C-alpha cells in the first residue's frame, strides 16, 4: 500500500490506481515515484493514498519538472503536451513533479522492437542508462514511433554531437552507457560508464 496515481488516462480511467514506489532521496526525504504511463492531451489525474479518496492530493500544473503545490482535495492535475509521463511526490514538501518521458533508446540490442525510456531530468534534457551485452547500433526516437527519430555521427564518447532527424545509427561496443539528449540544441552525449 501507499501512494498511487489515478485519473482519466486509459491505463486508469478513474478506476485503477497506478501504484507508486517509495524512495529516499540524497537528503533523506521520502518520496514516491510512478512508472511511466501513457498520457493524452486533456487527461486529468490526482494522487491518493491506499486507494482511498479520503486522502488525495491535487494542484495546478505549471510545467514539466516544476513543483506542483498539492492540497488535500485539490484540483485535478492536467499536464502539458507529452504522450508518456511519470510523477514523483515528496511527502515532506507536499509537492509533485511531473516528468515527460516521450523519448527512448532503440536498437539492435532489442531487435529494434521496444524503447528504453529516457526521463526528462530538467526541461528539454532527457537521460537514460543502457547496458549492452554485445555491440549494437542504436538511435533515439520520440513517442515509440519512427516519425521523429535521431541518429548521428559520434566522434568520441563523452563529447556532444549533432542529433539528426533520420540520421545514421550510432554504433556502440558492449558496456554500460549514459545517454543525455538536449532536445533544445539537438545534441546527444553518450558516455561509457
Image (spheres, rainbow, N blue to C red):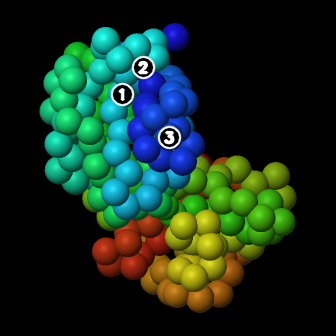
Residue denoted by label 2: 3
In the image, residue 22 above or below residue 17:
above
Q: Quadrant of residue 46?
A: top left
Q: Nearer the viewer, residue 40 or 155?
A: 40
Gap in angstroms between the C-alphas marked 2 and 3: 17 Å
Binning the other alpha carbons within 10 Å of mark 1 as few (below 14), some (14 to 19) or many (20 upward) gives many
Residue denoted by label 3: 13
Q: Residue at x 48, y 81 (%)?
A: 163
Foreground disc of the pair 2, 3: 3
- SS at mark 3? loop
Count how many numbered circles sit on residues in the image: 3
Q: Residue at x 52, y 52 (%)?
A: 38
Foreground disc of the pair 1, 3: 3
Left or right: 59, with 11 as reference point: left
Left or right: 72, with 20 as reference point: left
Q: Are marks 2 and 3 in contact (CB under 8 Å)?
A: no
Binning the other alpha carbons within 10 Å of mark 3 as few (below 14), some (14 to 19) or many (20 upward) gives some
Q: Quadrant of residue 54?
A: top left
Q: Along the polypeptide, which appears first: circle 1 or circle 3?
A: 3
Gap in angstroms between the C-alphas marked 2 and 1: 7 Å
On the image, the x and y values in percent for residue 147 come to: 57, 82
Q: Along the polypeptide, which appears first: circle 2 or circle 3?
A: 2
Residue 47 tag number = 1
Q: Nearer the viewer, residue 58 or 120?
A: 58
Amino acid at each position: 500500500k501507499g501512494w498511487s496515481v489515478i485519473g482519466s488516462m486509459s491505463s486508469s480511467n478513474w478506476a485503477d490506481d497506478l501504484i507508486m514506489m517509495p524512495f529516499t532521496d540524497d537528503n533523506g526525504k521520502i518520496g514516491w515515484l510512478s512508472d511511466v504511463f501513457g498520457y493524452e492531451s486533456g487527461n486529468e489525474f490526482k494522487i491518493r493514498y491506499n486507494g482511498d479518496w479520503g486522502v488525495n492530493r491535487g494542484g495546478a500544473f505549471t510545467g514539466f519538472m516544476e513543483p506542483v503545490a498539492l492540497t488535500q482535495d485539490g484540483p485535478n492535475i492536467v499536464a502539458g503536451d507529452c504522450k508518456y509521463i511519470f510523477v514523483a511526490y515528496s511527502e515532506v514538501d507536499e509537492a509533485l513533479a511531473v516528468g515527460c518521458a516521450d523519448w527512448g533508446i532503440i536498437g539492435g540490442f532489442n531487435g529494434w522492437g521496444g524503447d528504453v525510456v529516457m526521463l526528462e531530468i530538467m526541461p528539454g534534457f532527457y537521460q537514460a542508462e543502457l547496458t549492452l551485452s554485445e555491440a549494437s547500433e542504436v538511435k533515439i526516437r520520440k513517442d515509440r514511433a519512427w516519425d521523429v527519430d535521431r541518429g548521428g555521427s559520434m566522434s568520441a564518447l563523452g563529447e556532444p554531437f549533432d542529433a539528426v532527424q533520420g540520421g545514421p545509427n550510432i554504433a556502440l561496443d558492449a558496456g554500460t552507457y549514459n545517454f543525455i539528449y538536449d532536445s533544445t540544441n539537438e545534441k546527444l552525449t553518450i558516455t561509457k560508464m
